[in-house]
Amino acid sequence: MEQRYDQPQPEDVLAVRSRVSWASVFAGAFVALTLYLLLALFGGAVGLTLTAADVRSGTIGVFAAIWTIFSLAFSLFCGGCTATRCAVGETKAEAMLHGLLTWGVLLVLTFFMLGAGVRTGFSALMGGAYIARSANEAGTDWRELARQYGIPQDRIEQWRSQAERAAEQLRVNAQDPASQQAALEGTTAAMWWTFLGTLLSIGAAVAGALAGAGPELAFLNFGGRTHVTTAEHAGART
């Protein structure tokens, strides 16, 4: 039997509000970003240690790729779990949405940081170009500056020959079809690994959100009053 009210009810006059807790989403995103930066620093320290130990560059590259994917997935799992632990009474679908939003906010923050780094690097590059132009205007070159700083002549000649060989090798590789094909294959593989890593990071954020989701809430009406309880208790009472 439908219950009728003589007075307006709150749901008749109050606006429908969003079920998304943006405070929880940003909390999860910042936790994920902090963990990712921490793990990235640890991976960089390990990479430098392996380089100092004369480990092959190919092995270090594989380690770097695996560590990057792992650190991103682990950070987003913790971020998604944090987001839903801070929210209250969300359903499983809403928990997944919180995980996706956490992933999206982290992506925007990462792009912002990369953009700031690019601007910083560009400024440094312009500063280096200005110094080089000033040196050229002064009639000096890098070899003369090296001599002024006490670099031995044999070391200067060694650097010059290495630079010339590197420039010649780059010119040959640029004209070699096999090198061009290898570069194309490397770029393609990197794009596919980036795509798979992105899917894995989304899955990790959603999995963390589901793992941290609390009990679903249900609203029951007893004797004209609304009671809030968990969905499990509501099922048992009905």
Image: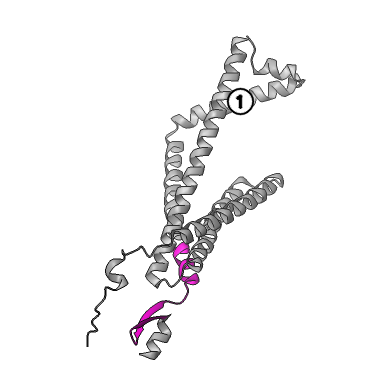
Give coordinates of residue 180: x percent, y percent: 43, 36
Which residue sits at x=48%, y=48%? 109
Give the quadrant of the C terminus.
bottom left
Q: Amino acid type of disc 1?
A: Ala
Q: Closest to the observer: 152 or 231?
A: 231
Q: Which residues are magenta?
A: 203-228
In the displayed structure image, the side of residue 132 where residue 234 appears, left or right = left
Tell me if residue 222 comes above or below residue 20 in the rendering: below
Q: Residue furthest bottom?
A: 237
Tell me if residue 120 comes above or below residue 238 in the rendering: above
For label 1, the crowd category at 10 Å Cα-Cα, with few meaning under 14, some 14 to 19 and many 20 or more, is few
Give coordinates of residue 87: x percent, y percent: 47, 67
Q: Secondary structure at mark 1?
A: helix
Give coordinates of residue 70: x percent, y percent: 54, 58
The image quarter containing residue 66 is bottom right
In the displayed structure image, the side of residue 151 where residue 21 appears, left or right = left
Give coordinates of residue 178: x percent, y percent: 44, 38
Q: Closest to the observer: 180 or 146?
A: 146
The image quarter containing residue 224 is bottom left
Residue 227 counted in the magenta span = yes
Tell me if residue 168 comes above or below residue 196 in the rendering: above
**Residue 193 visible within the image:** no
Q: Closest to the observer: 232 or 131?
A: 232
Which residue sits at x=43%, y=73%? 89
Residue 171 counted in the magenta span = no
Tell me if residue 211 comes above or below residue 111 in the rendering: below
The image quarter containing residue 1 is bottom left
Which residue sits at x=60%, y=19%? 131
Residue at the disc numbered 1: 163
In the displayed structure image, the side of residue 4 where residue 169 appears, left or right = right
